[in-house]
Image: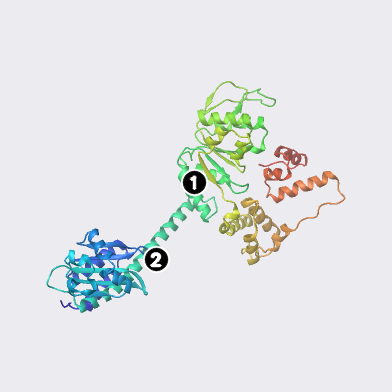
Amino acid sequence: MALKKPFETLLTISEEINSTHEIAVLLDRIMDSAMHVLESERGFILLKKNQENAAYETVTARNLSQENIDSIKGHSSSVVTKVLESHEPLISVNAQEDDRFSGAQSIVIQKIHSVICTPLLFKNQLMGAIYMDRQMSKSQFTEEALQFLSAFSAQAAIAIQNARLFSDLQRENKKLRSQISISERFPEIIGKSEPMLRLFEMVQSVAASTATVLIDGESGTGKELIAKAIHVNSHQKDKPFVPIFCGSLAENLLESELFGHKKGAFTGAGENKAGLFEEADGGTVFLDEIGEISMNLQTKLLRVIQEGEIKRVGETKIRTVDVRILSATNRDLEKEVKEGRFREDLFYRLNVINLKMPPLRERPGDIILLAEYFLKRFALKNKKNFKGFSKQAIHYLQEHNWPGNVRELENTIERAVILSNNSQIDADVFQLRKTEPKMPIGKTLKDINKYAILQTIEMTGGNRTQASKILGVSRRWLQYQLKEWGMVDEH
């Protein structure tokens, strides 16, 4: 069979297949084009599954069952096997009498008369093969047909590779668009690192539910921001979001804040007062540092979660509320449960959904992003203008361990903005923070204690709960000391 205008035909087909980027459509066009030009009766295309996997799979076929294809390519002496091993095209004008395939039963059983097969090569890397045959018909494939199919296969390999690259780009773009859209839903939270993107996805998933959520994480990681993001993206977004820091109040005051009180219930209760659960009815209550509450309050909180019921301090009347409870802790609550300091049933009620806030050291890609955000904010607040950070300053920020997490970074940048008078933030303004001040000698023990307490608070980025743990004292005692020195707690 002589081909009509083979080069013009090849050019036309090449233009058509190279304009196709959808891999499934492309493979069908390659198969149909080759069969049409060569007037073959049957055919299939094999492609390697991936670069790491040596196995080949049938990606498209014409007039052949998978059983017949397996028979054709399965034998060691088959046409396909020889082409894949040699990387060379192969033709058999009369396959029934061709000694090269004497062991291939498929040739006899399927009555294959003439066969042609070419490798799909891209930059000398084997991608697969195109196979076509004719059964017991008079016409045969020719050397001209082999030359055409070899040239066609080279163009087809390029088109397949381009389509794969295009598909990979589409997937990557889709992933990036998804990441951007997720980030845009939480504009108040700065972060584009993988740990934060995973967290955003979790927040997006749980926000629409009414399940309780426990947010675990070290101090200063931004647990309240995540709680707000859950509320803002929930069905309760138009209802109140009421946060309360459980570690800053004595038990009786915290109970009054949460549940309210009756007039005269205790000294100073001059009027009836609704608690935060009532104020948040229909919305969300965020209990920060939930691990700090007493066993008595744990029992009452469990009743709110289970029954939606509260009683104001000094009252016997039961009131009903509908609130979603989000909570956060930097403690290991499972350990607290084992040691008898936290109710197991309450823990499981709070921990229906668990979100873990990554510490800043686990999201190094966000450090400069956060630093630049804080720089703009504090520069505007202090009416200053900076070009940015010097290379040395960036190196310092990236190498520092940030035990105080985002809160420590925020305080560090604010301090740098206040102290710096240059056009950019240099590393030396951070080095001042690294210099350990000398312990006051010749001072009273009271002065030395005050010095140690204030230095520990500064070291923790202002986190007084963490400072109290380092000092080995209760937060209540620390609050008392600060109040005595005229440093009123703003939290």
Q: Say what amino acid the circle numbered 1 marks.
A: Val
Give the left or right position of residue 71, taking residue 223 as reference: left
Under tag 1, what secondary structure?
A: helix
Is 368 located above or below residue 240 in the figure? Answer: below
Q: Residue at x 71, y 51 (%)?
A: 459
- Front residue (pair 421, 62): 62
Image coords of residue 239 (percent x, y):
50, 37
- Indicate which disc residue 51 carries: 2
User: What sort of colour scheme is used for the picture?
Assistant: rainbow
Image coords of residue 32 (percent x, y):
22, 66
Mark 2 surroundings: few (<14), some (14-19) or many (≥20) residues within 10 A: few
Under tag 2, what secondary structure?
A: loop
- Indicate which disc residue 146 carries: none
Give the left or right position of residue 394, taking residue 189 as reference: right
Mark 1 surroundings: few (<14), some (14-19) or many (≥20) residues within 10 A: many
- Front residue (pair 229, 19): 19
Is 240 located above or below residue 165 in the figure? Answer: above
Image coords of residue 257 (percent x, y):
62, 32
Image quadrant where residue 149 sits = bottom left
Q: Residue at x 25, y 74 (%)?
A: 90
Q: Residue at x 71, y 47 (%)?
A: 457
Q: Residue at x 57, y 55 (%)?
A: 363
Image quadrant where residue 19 sits = bottom left
Give the left or right position of residue 238, taking residue 153 as reference: right
Q: CA distance from mark 1 to mark 2?
A: 37 Å
Q: Say what amino acid the circle numbered 2 marks.
A: Gln
Is 242 located above or below residue 197 in the figure? Answer: above
Image coords of residue 242 (percent x, y):
56, 37
Residue marked by disc 1: 203
For the C terminus, which image quadrant?
Answer: top right
For the N terminus, which image quadrant?
Answer: bottom left
